[in-house]
Image (cartoon, grey):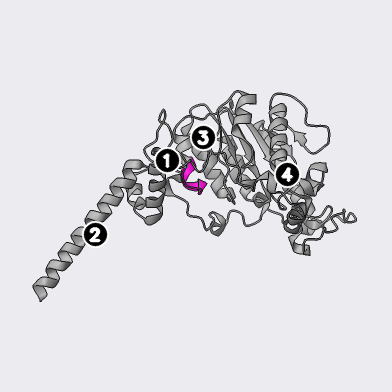
Amino acid sequence: MARNWIAWSRWFCLSLALFAGLVFTFIAGLDPFGLRVGVGQAPRPIMDINQRFMYPQLVRSGAFDAAVVGTSTMRLVDPRALSRDLGARFANLAMNAATPWEQMQTARLFQAHVAAPRWLVWGLDQTWCEADATDPAKWRTPRPVPAWFSRDVRWFDWLKLVNLTNLEIAGRLLAYRFGLTRERIRGDGYEVFTPPEASYDLSRARSHIYQGSGGKPEDLSPLPPAPVPLSESAGWRFPALDWLADSLAAYPPATRIMIVLPPSHVAAFPRTNSAGWQRYAACKSRVAAIARARGAALVDYAHPSPLTSDDTHYWDALHFRLPVAQRLEQELAAIATGGAPFDDGAARLSH
């Protein structure tokens, strides 16, 4: 009986090892995350919707010399439009809910792997102004961050590929190779992640924009001016902006940098003249100083304007619609080539 049990255990362990080896060989052979991709090699088709895993290969491929970095508020900016108007090869590396730490890692990875980066367009949300933005607990989101996100791939990274999720992604890539499915995200990182424009419903959008007030428009008019006492404002800290300054300083002088404070609905911003609004204004002043020190352009949409006050421009308080994204593409390209912002005052420009 004992011999039978030992024999069964041996065969079980052998079968398990053989199965794991086959899974590893299948995943490693297809290489769905582009771990083997280097300069001059084409990135793998993007079959996973988790951009954190898929974008590093775009950077390492050397196929792009310009990048958009940020959160979902920058994802609708089409890199093809910027590439056409600015004469560069743009990739959109913005990620849903990307923390300041993750954005910094993206910018550093791009700087480290691109010999002569031509453009960096970096969208900064209000998360950059949080007093605890640099706390280790806020470095990452619940979405897993791969080890090769911020460094070169090492041999032991391959061992982490053996799991059911990666097996699924490899299966999707195989199906793509046989023409049975399409890539999940375009090869330059661009994806229209919002619903189809034809499905837009204003009443539903307002229910998301004004979620805190039961879907009814809130009073967003300015409060009476009431300066925050110096005893309070002296304690304002924006530690993540040190990350921003260090990241920008690492880029060569020839790299042209544009910092964008992307448009969101005014309901997403602190109410004008409130203490939160004054704190955000102080944070933006620090961003402007960092931009000037690096010779970067700063384009500020994050304030009340016709662009941010019109409910019909938004799906929810944070995310604008495709026509707004197309406006940004045109306006940012115009500013980058020495033109003026549109005359509605939505974009405030500083150098």
Q: Residue 111 carries which label?
A: 3
Type of the residue with mark 3: Gln
Name the front one of labels 4 and 3: 4
Q: Which mark is residue 263?
A: 4
CA–CA distance between discs 1 and 4?
A: 36 Å
Asked where in the image residue 179 lies, by quadrant, the reply is top left
Report helix, strand or loop for mark 4: loop
Name the front one of labels 3 and 1: 1
Q: Residue 176 carries which label?
A: 1
Residue at the image position 78 percent from the left and 50 percent from the top: 266
Report helix, strand or loop for mark 3: helix
Report helix, strand or loop for mark 2: helix
Q: As drawn, is 45 to the left or to the right of 213?
A: left
Q: Could you classify mark 1 by the number of other residues whose Cα lies within 10 Å: few (under 14), some (14-19), or many (20 or more)? A: some
Type of the residue with mark 4: Pro
Q: What stretch is highlighted in magenta?
A: 47-55
